[in-house]
Amino acid sequence: MKKKHKHQRGLCLCEYTPALSDEAAVQIHEFLQVISATLLARYGSSIERHYAKKTRPNVNGLEPWKYSDEPF
């Protein structure tokens, strides 16, 4: 029976990934930038709407530290 890694959490396997060459790291980085830009171009407004729904309704935009529902 194989032992599971005790520090493995989710998809992050950073300590187990092999080293990359500089060129490979740059290619992956550029690929992720293109994917992110494409995702935001297509779904940016949907993402903004999602987070707008999750904001606190009583937060003063100019003075967010003055949240009216806090007990102190």
Image: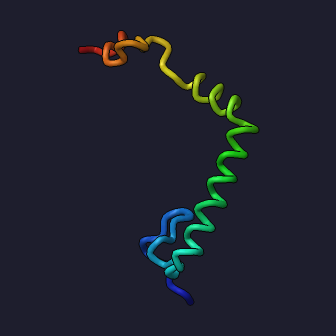
Q: Residue at x 43, y 74 (%)?
A: 6
Image-based side of 52 in relation to 42, left or right: left
59 or 23: which is nearer to us?
23
Residue 1 in which image quadrant: bottom right
Identity of the residue furthest to the bottom in this view? 1
Against 6, is 55 above or below? above
Q: Residue at x 72, y 46 (%)?
A: 38
Q: Position of residue 61 (x, y in %)?
A: 43, 14
Q: Residue at x 71, y 44 (%)?
A: 39
Residue 70 in which image quadrant: top left
Identity of the residue furthest to the right in this view? 42
Against 12, is 17 above or below? below
Against 42, is 29 above or below? below
Identity of the residue furthest to the left in this view? 72
Q: Position of residue 60 (x, y in %)?
A: 41, 11
Image-based side of 3 in relation to 41, left or right: left
- Looking at the rendering, in which quadrant would you find the C terminus? top left
Q: Position of residue 51 (x, y in %)?
A: 58, 29
63 or 31: which is nearer to us?
31
46 or 22: which is nearer to us?
22
17 or 4: which is nearer to us?
17
Q: Position of residue 7 (x, y in %)?
A: 42, 71
